[in-house]
Image (spheres, rainbow, N blue to C red):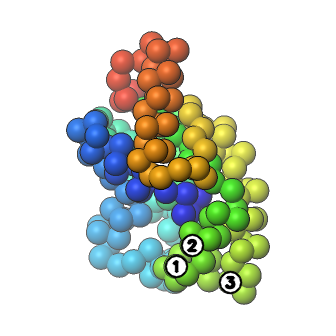
């Protein structure tokens, strides 16, 4: 979900483990030369999602990265299958009231440019939460503690996951 902390936590995890961090939205902006909001204005959400899916397919094929996806990436079943088949998928679960607090002053989020953005966040959460849970190998409570505390929680969960699955790599190229 938008405002969950994917970029902050992902960037810190990558730094601690000597991995490259890539934020899909920032990468898409860099490649197109325009902000996500502009892509939404010109191409609509469908056009943005198509670009997002193409980028995720390309980036998910890489090894030794931490990939921060956009909040709606799970809407596409192909994206969910792709992510599930490559690496370890983490869902930072944050309740809608906290997401609202984190995003209410951010005017750069196209999906929140509606008359009632708080209601929109709750609706998006109800739609996306089951999809995140479907694809996630690990669910982390993103509502508690500092970003560094969340990274420590994530490190412990990934270690436990690897022991359970006997997975020695974060990259399972398709």
- Which SS class for mark 2? helix
Instruction: Pick out the residue farthest to the bottom.
Output: 115
Left or right, 43 with reference to 101: left
- Identify the residue at image location x=49%, y=57%: 5
Quick one: label 3 or label 1, which is nearer the N terminus?
1
Label 2: how many Cα within 10 Å (few below 14, some 14–19, many 20+): some
- Which SS class for mark 3? loop
Residue 50 vs 142, above or below: the answer is below
Label 3: how many Cα within 10 Å (few below 14, some 14–19, many 20+): few
Residue 116 vs 142, above or below: the answer is below
Q: Position of residue 6 (x, y in %)?
A: 47, 53
Q: Is label 1 in contact with label 2 (beta carbons under 8 Å)?
A: yes
Give the residue at mark 2: 103
- Identify the residue at image location x=52%, y=69%: 47
Give the residue at mark 3: 114
Q: In terms of image quadrants, where is residue 16?
A: top left
Q: Is residue 125 visible?
A: yes
Q: CA distance from mark 1 to mark 2?
A: 5 Å
- Identify the residue at image location x=47%, y=15%: 163
- For marks 3 and 2, give the one nearer the viewer: 2
Q: Position of residue 37 (x, y in %)?
A: 48, 79
Q: Is label 3 in contact with label 2 (beta carbons under 8 Å)?
A: no
Residue 106 is labelled as 1
Q: CA distance from mark 3 to mark 1?
A: 13 Å
Q: Is residue 76 visible?
A: no
Q: Position of residue 145 (x, y in %)?
A: 53, 50
Residue 128 vs 150, above or below: the answer is below
């Amino acid at each position: 979900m938008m405002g969950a902390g994917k970029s902050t936590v992902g960037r810190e995890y990558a730094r601690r483990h000597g991995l490259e961090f890539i934020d899909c939205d920032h990468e898409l902006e860099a490649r197109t030369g325009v902000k996500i909001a502009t892509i939404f204005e010109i191409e609509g959400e469908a056009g943005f999602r198509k670009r997002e899916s193409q980028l995720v397919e390309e980036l998910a094929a890489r090894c030794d990265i931490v990939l921060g996806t956009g909040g709606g990436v799970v809407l596409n079943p192909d994206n969910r299958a792709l992510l599930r088949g490559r690496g370890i998928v983490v869902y930072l679960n944050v309740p809608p009231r906290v997401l609202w607090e984190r995003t209410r002053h951010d005017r750069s989020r196209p999906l929140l440019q509606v008359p009632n953005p708080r209601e929109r966040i709750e609706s998006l959460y109800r739609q996306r939460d089951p999809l995140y849970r479907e694809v996630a190998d690990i669910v982390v409570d993103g509502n508690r503690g500092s970003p560094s505390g969340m990274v420590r929680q994530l490190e412990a969960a990934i270690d436990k996951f690897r022991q359970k699955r006997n997975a020695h790599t974060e990259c399972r190229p398709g």
